[in-house]
């Protein structure tokens, strides 16, 4: 197995490292107090970070999944808030590329590529449906109304969504809603909903522990009328679309966690060499050395799992069928990468904070931000418990 990166992948890694160190690093602490500014989002969009995964023929950077992971790691090393903002936008862009119609790409993907919409959002979770996402209640009723789309046919969406990442920044949302009278996941369809439609209400920003520069809001859709052309794929395909998106999304979350863990290790190593106790650097104590050795080893293991999942996604992307579904499944590999990388990153951040002693608990050092930012990675896009369910299901061949 060849673990080396291609020339292009190394260039992407270097380019994103340079951009984020120069442009975003000076803002990282500000993002602990304030949301990412429109000016920053515009810069990210102009550089192409919001549409890295979009093929060049549609105006994106055309990166493969390994390059996307490398860039997300570099971003998250510097600022987790920007990491999640970019990752979710690329996930929606990827759905539009793989599952959208030409008209949907023309309208929505072009908005992302041009920067007219600085980000995009994924609306699956509701008050009473988190891990059990298939129990969602938001409804999409078929309607016929003059002037609505090409044939006056459309849907009226009603319901509430919570934890909408990028909510305040996005011009459009991918909303999962029940349009068929079927229980569970089968009745769910996916819709593209523009922010300026009547009835789209942006709610409260969540007051979060970490990733404080990113936007996470509640939203309600109060009888929002959209044309039939905004339906992604066929009715009843929504849950499968969401799960396919999350397969890729989980590799991205694993990459965010890995990036934060790498930054934490670097901070721990620097501090251990500088801080002296008992007349010598604390790096001379075996207790500290073992924490660093364990961290470096588990980072390397996570990296291997992520690279395996990302390279399978690359192969899958080349083999997709007409519905956008991959012939090759990488669900198992993506869940393993997310489970291991996120739990590993939490442990590494915790150990590196311990190396900082009391100073680690202050805002004088970035390690406290890494600890806050990394915590959510084992929660969103499927908790660790759900990843274990997915892994066991794939291995045992049993449904949840
Ligand atoms: C900052 C942030 C950003 C987010 N962004 C988005 C977004 O953009 N779009 C979106 O749709 N959602 C988003 N989410 C929602 C996120 O995906 C959910 O929080 C997550 O899926 C868990 O759902 P829940 O919070 O309702 O927890 P619950 O499902 O209520 O779970 C509570 C606990 O029970 C456990 N549990 C549940 N079911 C089982 C089971 N069968 N077996 C064992 N344990 C179980 C869980 O693992 C967890 O520990 C975001 C969340 C956060 C915090």
Image (cartoon, helix red, strand yellow):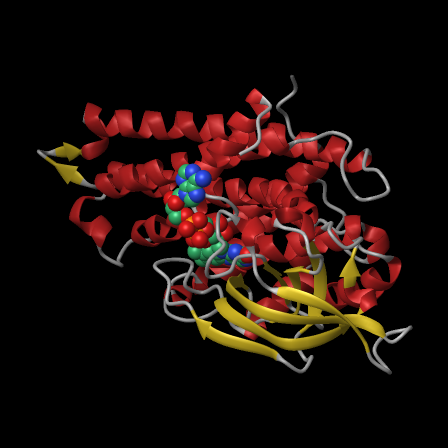
Q: Of 171 and 142, which appears nearest the observer?
A: 142
| Residue 52 locus on image (x, y percent) | 69, 51
Q: Residue at x 23, y 49 (%)?
A: 360
> For this view, does 363 lie left or right of residue 127?
left
Q: Is residue 342 visible?
A: no
Q: Quadrant of the N terminus?
A: top right
Q: Residue furthest right?
A: 151
Which quarter of the picture shows residue 316?
A: top right
Which quarter of the picture shows residue 346?
A: top left
> For this view, does 103 lie left or right of residue 254?
right
Q: Residue at x 51, y 40 (%)?
A: 254
Which quarter of the picture shows residue 149?
A: bottom right
Q: In the picture shown, does residue 223 fall above or below 130?
A: below
> For this view, does 269 lie left or right of residue 386?
left
Q: Residue furthest left?
A: 278
Q: In the picture shown, does residue 331 fall above or below 195?
A: above
Q: Residue at x 18, y 44 (%)?
A: 357
Q: Of 274 and 59, which appears nearest the observer?
A: 59
| Residue 228 locus on image (x, y percent) | 82, 67
> For this view, does 288 lie left or right of residue 343?
left
Count all numbered tags in the image, as a single digit. Answer: 0
| Residue 356 locus on image (x, y percent) | 23, 44
Q: Residue furthest top?
A: 1
Q: Of 216 and 277, which appears nearest the observer?
A: 216
Q: Residue at x 57, y 47 (%)?
A: 72
Q: Is residue 32 visible?
A: yes
| Residue 388 locus on image (x, y percent) | 47, 32
Q: In the picture shown, does residue 292 fall above or below 216?
A: above
Q: Of 100 and 233, which appears nearest the observer?
A: 233
């Amino acid at each position: 197995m060849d673990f080396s990166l291609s020339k292009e992948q190394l260039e992407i890694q270097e380019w994103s490292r340079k951009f984020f160190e120069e442009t975003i690093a000076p803002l990282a602490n500000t993002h602990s107090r304030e949301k990412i500014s429109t000016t920053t989002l515009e810069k990210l969009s102009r550089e192409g970070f919001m549409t890295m995964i979009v093929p060049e023929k549609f105006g994106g950077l055309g990166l493969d999944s390994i390059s996307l992971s490398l860039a997300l790691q570099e971003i998250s090393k510097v600022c987790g808030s920007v990491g999640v903002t970019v990752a979710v936008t690329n996930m929606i862009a990827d759905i539009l590329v793989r599952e959208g119609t030409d008209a949907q790409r023309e309208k929505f993907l072009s908005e992302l590529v041009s920067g007219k919409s600085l980000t995009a959002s994924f609306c699956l979770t509701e008050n009473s449906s988190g891990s059990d996402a298939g129990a969602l209640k938001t409804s999409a009723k078929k309607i016929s109304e003059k002037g609505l789309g090409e044939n006056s046919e459309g849907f009226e969406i009603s319901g509430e969504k919570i934890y909408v990442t990028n909510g305040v920044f996005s011009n459009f949302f991918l909303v999962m809603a029940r349009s068929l009278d079927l229980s569970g996941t089968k009745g769910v369809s996916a819709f593209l909903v523009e922010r300026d439609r009547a009835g789209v209400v942006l709610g409260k920003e969540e007051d979060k522990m970490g990733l404080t520069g990113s936007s996470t809001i509640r939203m309600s859709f109060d009888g929002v009328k959209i044309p039939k052309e905004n339906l992604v794929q066929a009715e009843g395909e929504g849950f499968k679309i969401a799960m396919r998106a999350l397969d890729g999304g989980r590799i991205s979350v694993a990459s965010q966690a890995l990036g934060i863990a790498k930054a934490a290790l670097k901070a721990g190593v620097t501090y251990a060499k500088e801080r002296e106790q008992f007349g010598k650097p604390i790096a001379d104590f075996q207790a500290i050395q073992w924490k660093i050795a364990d961290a470096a080893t588990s980072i390397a293991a996570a990296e291997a799992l992520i690279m395996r999942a990302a390279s399978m996604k690359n192969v899958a992307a080349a083999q997709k069928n007409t519905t956008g579904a991959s012939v090759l499944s990488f669900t198992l590999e993506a869940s393993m990468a997310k489970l291991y990388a996120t739990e590993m990153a939490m442990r590494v951040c915790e150990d590196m904070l311990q190396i900082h002693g009391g100073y680690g608990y202050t805002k004088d050092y970035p390690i406290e931000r890494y600890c806050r930012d990394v915590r959510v990675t084992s929660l969103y896009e499927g908790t660790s418990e759900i990843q274990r369910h997915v892994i066991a299901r794939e291995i045992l061949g049993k449904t949840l």
